[in-house]
Amino acid sequence: MRLKKLLKEDHIDSSEKISVQQLLVDSFIEEHIHEFVEVEYILSGQGLQTINGCTRKVGRGSLILINYQDRHSIETSGDMDYVNILLEPEFVSHELTGVNHDFDMLAIAAFSDFDRDACPIYPVVEFKGREMLELESLIRTMLDEFKQKRAGYITVLKSYVNILFTAYLRKTMEMLGTDAYRDVRQTVRNVLDYIEAFPSSRLSLKDLAGAGFYNPSYFSRMFREQCGMTVREYLCRLRIQSARKMLEETSLKLYRIAIQAGFGNSSSFYRIFREHVGMTPEEYRKACHGSKGDKK
């Protein structure tokens, strides 16, 4: 199934190279990609942000950086109010981003290796207390500048964007520099390696905690804090992704996909897949290929 692609000419005025809007989402924004860099700041409410298959809970104080061509979706259970900043990369000053390549943004590069090393932790940083209030003041000023379009507003917005990215970088470096965070990051990486080594196993919380020599209760709490979901939810999402890939790219029988994706049996596979995808595995295969899927 082809992802929806958002084009910059539909969302950003070519003479401005930036868009700053306050938006409200109350349910779901389907997975998509875009030709521009997107920065989101959550003003109120809560939701789940999924970028390149990795999901994390976000709320007030969350600053999210989404690179061009990143797969991205949003899910909420109620209203979530956020500021959406869309940028053509050349809008950001070379002093901050470097001059080698338009898309070689320092802020994106700072998180790219981090993202690959620990999938559930993607470009989201959290601001609290005074820092959060200062950031919100900056972002609301950006909203006003973009709306009013007073003389020199583009120059002013460039300065504010540089301040915004500097705040993002400082918070990123602060996170990466703590011993506790490095320990958690290493633990998450170890667990992911373990999951990848046994993709078809019926892994449990006890199994994963034991792989890192952690108490299951402590490991469960730590995993949820870092990933924004429980171990069970993460394993379920991982298995759904694996099953979708096999349905899209292979002609394997459905019972074999159920086993290889780690569901254990066809009935669990059918039930869980339908709950998360909204259709049966066979219906999903037909939608992808336009042909009759395999029977069990």
Image: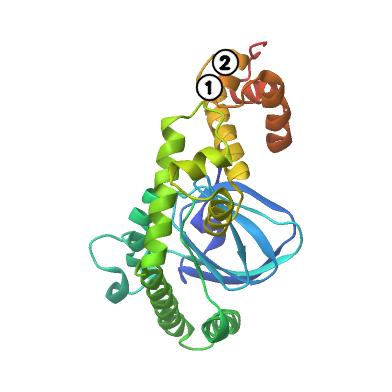
> What residue is rendered at 75% in x and 59% in y?
26
15 above or below 102? below
Residue 256 is tagged as: 2
208 above or below 147? above
Where, quadrant-wise, is the N terminus in this rendering? top right
13 on left or right of 30: left
Residue 273 horizontal/vertical position (percent): 68, 30
Residue 212 horizontal/vertical position (percent): 43, 46
- Specify how the rendered protein is coloured: rainbow
278 on left or right of 232: right
**Toward the viewer: 208 or 114?**
208
**Toward the viewer: 273 or 95?**
273
- Tell me the quarter of the picture where residue 271 sits: top right
Where, quadrant-wise, is the C terminus in this rendering? top right
Q: Amino acid at mark 2?
A: Arg
Tell me the CA gap for discs 1 and 2.
6 Å
- Tell me the quarter of the picture where residue 62 sits: bottom right
**Toward the viewer: 136 or 58?**
58
Residue 260 is tagged as: 1
Residue 255, can we see it?
A: yes
* Secondary structure found at label 2: helix
> What residue is rendered at 61% in x and 49% in y?
230
Residue 99 horizontal/vertical position (percent): 24, 67
